[in-house]
Amino acid sequence: MTNLTPHLFWITSRAAGFAALVLASLAVSVGLLMSTKLLKGRTSELRAAHDTLALSTIVAIVVHGVSLLGDQYLHPSVLDISLPFVSGYKTLWTSLGIVGGWGLIVLGLSYYARRWVGAVRWRQLHRFTALAWLAGLAHALGEGTDAGQLWFLAMIALVVIPALGLLFTRLAKSGAAAGPPAPQPRMAKNRPSGPPLTTGVVPVSASSPQH
């Protein structure tokens, strides 16, 4: 029987990373469902689910990174798991994971500070959540130990493909809304003859008797 104790931290990190990606994908899907209004009348339920998924994603990300500190193979430092381009292990993919992780954490917690940030500014910042999620997805596919496994790709596809579809739908709607304004009708140069338009006030003519 294989002794899993030396690999316990590595296995924990892998499991937490997989959970973080699944939870983040579901959170993105639910958030996009709210923004695209595809499920009208379910806003309160979707918001509650979105908040739970976002907080669960943050916990999974923290566990994913902190667990690596105990790994006996990599021996990463705190800087290696918290700052991009510091670790020498698959630097690009590791850095994408760090950027995506911090992005999801900061943007997720910003929901509770929107009264100080401002609702409009917070919505603008929250749009970057999709970029942070995509960075985490690239990190998992480029560096993940299980990235080449069929079961891993199948499980990820179940949550990633719907999220990507909703994201493209949201971008398409945003592009249509930001299109050129409709042309305004041109005003006629010469007003047609006829009685003057009234506005509900009877005009006083110059020949009217004065009191």
Image (tube, rainbow, N blue to C red):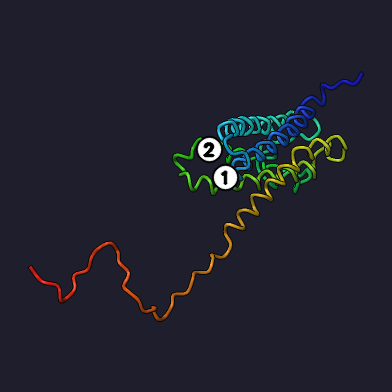
**Cα distance in 3D space between marks 2 and 1:** 9 Å
Amino acid at pointer 2: Tyr
Task: Please identify the quadrant where the C terminus is shown.
Answer: bottom left
> Which mark identifies residue 111?
2
Which residue corresponds to the image point at 67% horizontal and 47% vertical from the top-left? Answer: 167
Please give the residue where the numbered disc 1 appears in the rendered image. Answer: 126
The answer to whether residue 57 of the structure is visible from this angle is yes
Vertical comparison of 159 with 209: above or below: above
Say which element carries label 1. Answer: helix
Vertical comparison of 55 with 175: above or below: above
Circles 2 and 1, Cβ within 8 Å, touching? The answer is: yes
Residue 156 vs residue 72, the one in the foreground: 156
Q: Could you classify mark 2 by the number of other residues whose Cα lies within 10 Å: few (under 14), some (14-19), or many (20 or more)? A: some
The answer to whether residue 86 of the structure is visible from this angle is no
> Which mark identifies residue 62?
none
Task: Please identify the quadrant where the N terminus is shown.
Answer: top right
Whole-percent x and y of residue 170?
A: 64, 49
Q: Earlier in the sequence, mark 2 or mark 1?
A: 2
Which residue corresponds to the image point at 54% horizontal and 65% vertical from the top-left? Answer: 182
Q: Residue furthest top?
A: 1
